[in-house]
Each structure stands twice: as C-alpha cells, then as structure tokens.
Image (cartoon, rainbow, N blue to C red):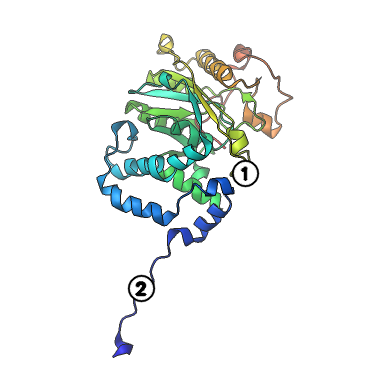
Amino acid sequence: MAGSRRSEPEPEPEPERRPEHRALRDRLPQTVREHVPPVSAVREVVRDRVDQISVPEKLRGPEDEESTPGAVLYWMLRNVLVGPTVDRVFRPVAEGVQNVPAHGPAILACNHLSYADWLFLPLVLDRRVTFVAKSDYFTGSGIRGWAQRRFFRGTGQVPVDRSGGRASEGALRAGLKVLQRGELFGIFPEGTRSHDGRLYKGRTGVARLALEAGVPVIPCAVIGTDVIAPPGKMLSRVISPTVKFGRPLDFSRYQGLAEDRFILRSITDEIMYAIMELSGQTYVDSYATSARAGQQSTPEPGRNPGAASARDSGRQNDAAPPADAD
C-alpha cells in the first residue's frame, strides 16, 4: 500500500544555498563575486580529483605524517578553493622569494597590518607556512567566525590561549615542533595587528625561538593588506598587496644564550629593523597592545629598533605569544 511506503530522507541542501554561504558571497564586491565559482561546481571537481591528489612534500604540514587529510585540505584550499581566486582577483606581488629556502626549517617574521596577512604571506610561496593563532579565531561567531574556523583548521594552524600566564610557552613549544620537522613557521613579533599602520616594538619570543631551534629568521613585510581588510571590515578594497622577503638573519653566534634578556632584546630589535627597512613603516618604540589601549604615554615615532634595548630589557612579559594576532 502507498501508506506503508517509507518516506525518503530529505536531501541535503546545496552548499551555495546554505545561509552562511549565501550571506558570505552576497557581502563580496561584484568584481570579486564574478570570480568566485559556485560551491557545487567546486564540489564536483573535488569529487573527481580528491582520490588522485598526491600532495607535494613541500606542502605537507607538521601533522601530515599521521594525518594525510590535513595535507589534502591545504592543497585544495591553496590550489582549488581559495588560492586561484585570490590570486586572480588581488594579483599579489612577491619580492625576494629566493630568500626563502626551498627545504629545511626557518622562521618567517612579519609585520602585522590585517587578518589578511595570514592569507597573502603563504600564498606567494610554494612551501606551507604554519602560524600560531590565538584561540579566539577558532571560537568566533557569525559569518566571519565561520570563515575563520574553516580557514585556520583547514590549513593546520595551531590555536593558543594567550589569556594565561603560560601563553608564550605554548606558542614556543608549538613553533619548536614545527621547526623540528623541517617546516616554515610564521611569526608576527608585534604580537597583534597595528591599529594605525605603524610598526611597533617586537616581543622577544621570536628571538628565543630562533636560538632554541637554531634556525635562521627571514624578515618579511606585507604592504597594502590594511587597505584590503582594515580592522573591523572583512573586505574594503581590491588592490594588489606586496609581500617582501629579506635576506635570512643568522643568530648562531648567540647559541646557548636563550636565557639572556639583553641578547634576546638585541636579536629582536635587529629583526624589527630589517622588517622596518622592507615595509617602510614608521617605527614606534612601544608595544602595540599598550599603545592601542592607551596604557602608555604618547609613543615616540621614528626611533630605530634597539634605541631603548638596555632600558627595556628588564621589563616583564616581553616574550608574549610570538605569533599571536588580533
């Protein structure tokens, strides 16, 4: 009888029809939306090719030895889902890519202007870059929170809670694990985004990590990402950002001195000076978090990193999460 027939389960809605996907695409400018393929089309490509993907060794992340899906998802994001569209729309310009080693561990120390820095810095490289990201990026709500969770989890980034006193230790341990596997580890020494486009004093966590891991530090600078995605906006303007890579900095002469705060401050200032030369930013001799919160007196613009090394080397909490960001 017709009444005894089992009801078929409702089919899952097409991804592009889901509210979060529809709202996300509607918020994009028309010039960008034209280049974003329908999710159903991308899904067909994934179905046809995912079983045939052989992820290059240079794109494998720290967890891929035990989890191949992580490498496959990173490959898909970079080469199918995100990378080609971003590259076609924004056309990022890369300079000094030859300074990044083709193999082996290294620290990429970069200025921080926008959350988009996480996207453009790895995009211009053939190798995978792993960052330590604050745990807030994995717990956000709304469209932006959903997009951030998808992106950071998909690319194998490491969440760190910086609210506790051991936040810097967690970031350091995570960075050491990545570097010990011969990978690239990305750090924003300022500890948070610059709220006014200037370059702020670096935290010494990057110096400690370089000495404990015994790896070179490559200074990097992103230019224009604060115009693309300024604080509080997901996307403002479509321009071509520039990503610059400086010559590797070797600090092996300080090996074994990772507990000397004067050495750590000296190394950090040298790294920040190299970043300043690449970015062309005005340097501010105070921490970005303090300046933004108004907890310090008016900062002194234009001073070179290192000018107050001896004075500030004894301050506490100087090694806050090296790769953390707001």
Q: Nearer the viewer, residue 85 or 255?
A: 85
Mark 1 lies on a secondary structure that is loop
Which badge, 2 or 1, is on the more N-terminal residue? 2
Q: Nearer the viewer, residue 289 or 194?
A: 194
> Could you tell me which residue is drawn at 37 percent across and 54 percent down?
43
Q: Residues within 10 Å of mark 1 (few under 14, many from 20)?
A: few
Residue 186 image offset from top left, x and y in percent: 45, 29
Q: Amino acid at mark 2?
A: Pro
- Do the CB atoms of the residues marked 2 and 1 lie less than 8 Å apart? no
Residue 21 visible to the viewer: yes
Instruction: Using residue 303 as the reference point, say whether residue 157 is left or right of it.
Output: left
Residue 138 image offset from top left, x and y in percent: 48, 46
Whole-Å distance between the Cαs marked 2 and 1?
A: 40 Å
Q: Quadrant of the C terminus?
A: top right
> Could you tell me which residue is drawn at 51 percent across and 28 percent down?
93
Q: Quadrant of the N terminus?
A: bottom left
Residue 181 image offset from top left, x and y in percent: 32, 28
Q: Residue furthest top?
A: 253
> Could you tell me which residue is drawn at 43 percent across and 54 percent down?
39
Image position of 218 with respect to 117: above or below:
above
Residue 115 image offset from top left, x and y in percent: 55, 38
Residue 322 visible to the viewer: no
Q: Which residue is mark 1?
A: 233
Q: Amino acid at mark 1?
A: Lys
Q: Which residue is mark 2?
A: 9
Q: Nearer the viewer, residue 75 or 185?
A: 75
Q: Residue furthest right?
A: 298
Instruction: Using residue 317 as the reference point, say whether residue 160 is left or right of it.
Output: left
Q: Residues within 10 Å of mark 2 (few under 14, many from 20)?
A: few
Tell how many labels. Answer: 2
Image position of 109 with respect to 15: above or below:
above
Mark 2 lies on a secondary structure that is loop
